[in-house]
Structure formats: C-alpha cells, structure tokens
Amino acid sequence: MSKSLNDLIQSSAVPVFVDFWADWCGPCKMVAPSVKKLALEFSGRMVVVKVNVDRQPAAAAQFQVQGIPALMLFDKGKLVWRTAGALSYQQIRAEVVKVLGG
C-alpha cells in the first residue's frame, strides 16, 4: 500500500489528506468524525485517505509516522501540513482551507 499511497500523492490533481490511525487509538476515534466531515465538505476538491498503521506498517514507516493520529496534507506531491494528536474539526479545517481556499 505504501507505494500506491505515494503514487496517489504524486499523481493526484487535487490535494491529498492522509489520516494515519489504528483501531486501539482513542485520539484516532476522536478525530475520525472530523476527517469524515472534511471528506464530505471538500469532496471533489481533496482526496481523503485513511491508513491503518497496524495493517500498513510500511506506509507508516515511509511517511515517518511516530505518533497517531498523524494527519498530513499533500499538495502537488509535496507535504504542506503535518500534525500528530487529536485536533478539533475547526483546527484541521483551518489548515485545509489554507491550501484549498474557503
């Protein structure tokens, strides 16, 4: 999966938002509704990908994920924003809007 995730990031015509998470991660469960809401709100303007670090450890290693949830936003193949930990919907959305515009 890590190669195809990288391929998606490099080839996407729209920004790619990646959520690295795991089933056992409480903060990941707190962030999940915000990620889903962003995917709906920015549908067609941004691709949202969820990566389970337990099922895809190579992807987590490739993107140097050291804590989850790890949220990353790529634009034109380049990492433009990255954070780890549970943020509010408003905090995450503000970062997305910086890249996508309102």
Image (cartoon, grey):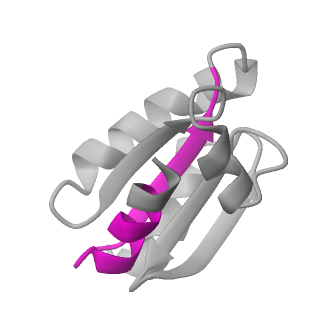
Q: Residue furthest top?
A: 24
**Residue 49 x/y as whole percent:** 40, 47
Q: Residue furthest left?
A: 44
Answer whether residue 101 is visible to the viewer in this image: no
Q: Residue furthest right?
A: 66
Q: What's the residue at 36%, 51% (across, down)? A: 48
Q: What's the residue at 52%, 67% (across, down)? A: 73
**Residue 77 x/y as whole percent:** 44, 82
**Residue 60 x/y as whole percent:** 67, 48
- Is residue 58 part of the magenta span, yes or no? no
Image quadrant in which the C terminus is located:
bottom left
The magenta span reads 5-22
Residue sitting nearer the eye, 88 or 40? 40
Q: Could you say which quadrant of the image residue 85 lies in?
A: top right
Answer whether residue 71 is visible to the viewer in this image: yes
Q: What's the residue at 29%, 77% (across, down)? A: 11
Residue 55 lies left or right of residue 99; in this view the side is right
Residue 51 lies left or right of residue 21; in this view the side is left
- Is residue 11 part of the magenta span, yes or no? yes
